[in-house]
Image (cartoon, rainbow, N blue to C red):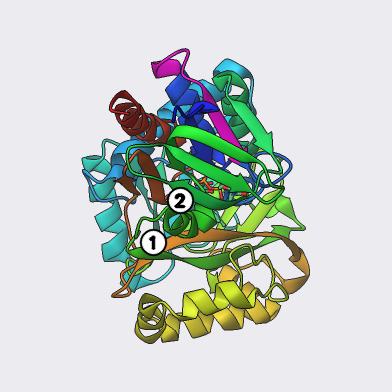
Amino acid sequence: MRIVYDCDVLVIGGGIVGLSTAYAITRAAPGTRVTVLEKEQGPARHQTGRNSGVIHSGIYYRPGSLKARYAVRGAAEMVKFCAEYGIAHAVTGKLIVATDKAELPRLHGLVQRGRENGIPVRELGPAQIAEYEPEVRGLAAIHVGTTGICDFVAVARQLGESSGAEIRYGADVVRVDRRPGRGAAVLTADGAVVRGRVLVNCAGLHCDELARLAGDDPEMRIVPFRGEYYTLARPELVHGLVYPVPDPAFPFLGVHLTRGIDGGVHIGPNAVPALAREGYGWGVVRPRELGATLAWPGAWRIARRHWRYGAGELRRSLSKPAFTDAVRRLLPAVTPDDLVPAAAGVRAQAVLRDGTLVDDFLIREGPRTVHVLNAPSPAATASLPIGREVARRALGALAGA
Ligand SMILES: Cc1cc2nc3c(=O)[nH]c(=O)nc-3n(C[C@H](O)[C@H](O)[C@H](O)COP(=O)(O)OP(=O)(O)OC[C@H]3O[C@@H](n4cnc5c(N)ncnc54)[C@H](O)[C@@H]3O)c2cc1C
């Protein structure tokens, strides 16, 4: 029986990665019919629209890793993309500040790493820190020149528009039917069936579930980590972007001070377990999703390994004075009254069965399928190169279909 396909490539997920993939496919192979299915009523309603809005330089990542290569290249491309389409952005630079002697070796390590990744870094003493940020205290810092800020939601929307793809909002994929030698037919919650020759899974916080629906074992699970933010009521205390020295045990960068593209200063995100994949507050609990997380041995292994750090993060999540105390290490003038609760985000962090937090971007292929299984920070910055790589694989699968 001859199958009639609705499109050549069917992308699930209208965040920045899915839309960048659609954009890259239609650039590389004009005429390819791409459909994007997004369950929300607009683009970028989850990670892409709930992040720090920082164009990362690539300083943190292991030289040669996908994160390092794609962030360095992606940051430059993101600035160009924003300039080309008139999207709000600025190359501001940022400070990474050591507030404790024990952090100095790690700060020097970052200088090395930055240089290996080809990033301009300048080492600063306390007096020079004050020239950039009079209210910030630190023993030493580095200034990273290529960091910037932008409006990632506008970028995602523009990628979708420029791709010429058909984007269907309100299309929640609930079933995937894949047969040998054929493409995929997906069923959405409202009963529509959409057929594509090749399937691309960019479902972010739900990517492991989608992989399993498609019949592939992703060998990882998403463990959702919420990042909570406050807005600074006295934004004049912070001029630009100020980060702590990150803890190398975690792929998270630590609570930072970010003057965003809207002019406001955001403080966060911390990292606490979310009780639902889209659990933006402690009150959002989805027993089925929570049960699936707890059934994954890797989640328990992380809890055992990092309980001390986790307990501190919980305390700072539940107590504003405790959160304020932590921020005071960088910004002594801040008081609890200066911190106004703001919207949180949830990170889609892939965790292996043995409890390893997957550090690099992870893209896997199944028959006529490409799954993006780990695209946490800096994936918004790196979305143009990631999209090209996913597109290359999808077009390869299409050529063989
Ligand atoms: C708190 C926080 C701070 C961050 N800060 C930065 C930063 O400053 N700089 C940076 O570069 N990166 C940052 N990141 C990371 C960045 O936001 C993500 O890496 C990036 O947005 C991932 O994009 P995505 O398209 O993979 O995921 P998402 O934006 O989450 O998109 C996935 C989409 O898939 C859709 N979907 C899921 N399931 C289905 C289904 N069944 N059917 C249809 N659609 C479905 C969802 O609705 C969603 O829109 C941060 C992330 C967080 C959470």
**Residue 68 visible, this angle:** yes
Q: Camera-side residue: 364 or 186?
A: 186
In the rendered image, residue 216, in percent from the top left (x then y), is placed at 36, 55
Label for residue 251? Answer: 1
Q: Where on the picture, by quarter, is residue 140?
A: bottom left
Extent of the magenta region: 27-37
Amino acid carrying label 2: it is: Ser
Under tag 1, what secondary structure?
Answer: loop
In the rendered image, residue 287, in percent from the top left (x then y), is placed at 62, 78
Is residue 307 shown above or below 6? below
Q: Camera-side residue: 291 or 191?
A: 191
Amino acid carrying label 1: it is: Pro
Left or right: where does residue 169 sit relative to residue 181? right
Q: Is residue 28 magenta?
A: yes
Is residue 39 shown above or below 346? above
Q: Camera-side residue: 293 or 254?
A: 293
Q: Residue at x 61, y 40 (%)?
A: 193
Residue under circle 2?
A: 377
**Mark 2 touches mark 1? (CB < 8 Å):** yes
Label for residue 80? Answer: none
Q: How far apart are marks 2 and 1 (CA)?
A: 8 Å
Disc 2 C-beta below 8 A from ligand 1: yes
In the rendered image, residue 360, in percent from the top left (x then y), is placed at 32, 52
Q: Residue at x 33, y 43 (%)?
A: 180
